[in-house]
Amino acid sequence: MNYKRFPLGALWTNGYLFWDDESHEAFFIDPGGKTRDVQKFLKEHDLKLTMILLTHGHIDHIAGIHELVPYVHDNIYIGEKDAAMLRKPSTQLQELLGVHCEGINEFHEVNEGREIDFPGYKIKVMETPGHTEGSVCYIITDKENHSLLISGDTLFAQSVGRTDLEGGDEIKLEASLRRLDTLKPGLHVLPGHGPDTSIGEERELNPYWPR
């Protein structure tokens, strides 16, 4: 599975670039800040960016999206219940982080169980509200049947996303963690901030994990 992490923006949000060796097509997850390094990598490796996935609508995960829209046009996906946040980004969070981001209106809304086909990959949407109402995780599987989980701000290494911002709900987040607990322990997890982890590690070490 080909992917590269790009820490972006004021909070060093983990953005992830995935690509297929045969088609040279690529998709990017959560462009949270200036994407100059992403665009440089695309050019150096002769990759064509054709899709953007968003785990949720907070400004630190969408702030760089306008720089990539010319590549993908409307081929952008976000959880249905966070769509309003993409159309009109939170002014409160923009002021808090000192960034400015105009909303966009051309994109696709996704919900539970949606499968997105991409050259070399299958991507399945898992609704995991709690950090925001429309937070989603993506289970990405390559053609060799290797899978990993993009968890956004639902799950971090030995932590979880905060629930005191717009759309947050502690009870819903706990329910989402219980859903993640049904996944295989060896499933690799790429979170929205911080280092990689796995479902098994979080089951054992995360103090917020449902017992």
Image: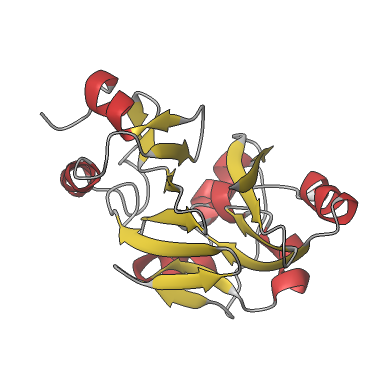
Q: Is residue 86 visible?
A: yes
Answer yes or no: is residue 55 visible.
Answer: no
Which residue sits furthest left?
Answer: 211
Q: Is residue 23 above or below residue 133?
A: below
How far across and how far down the image is residue 175, in percent? 16, 47
The image shows a total of numbered marks equal to 0
Instruction: Left or right? Give the position of 102 relative to 128.
Output: right
Q: Residue furthest front?
A: 144
Looking at the rendering, in which quadrant would you find the C terminus?
A: top left
Residue placed most toward the observer, 128 or 93: 128
Q: Position of residue 185 (x, y in %)?
A: 28, 34
- Name the residue at 43% across, 75% down: 109
Q: Nearer the viewer, residue 166 or 48?
A: 48
The reply, left or right, for residue 184 in relation to residue 79 is: left
Q: Residue at x 37, y 32 (%)?
A: 198
Above-or-below relation of 53 to 186: below
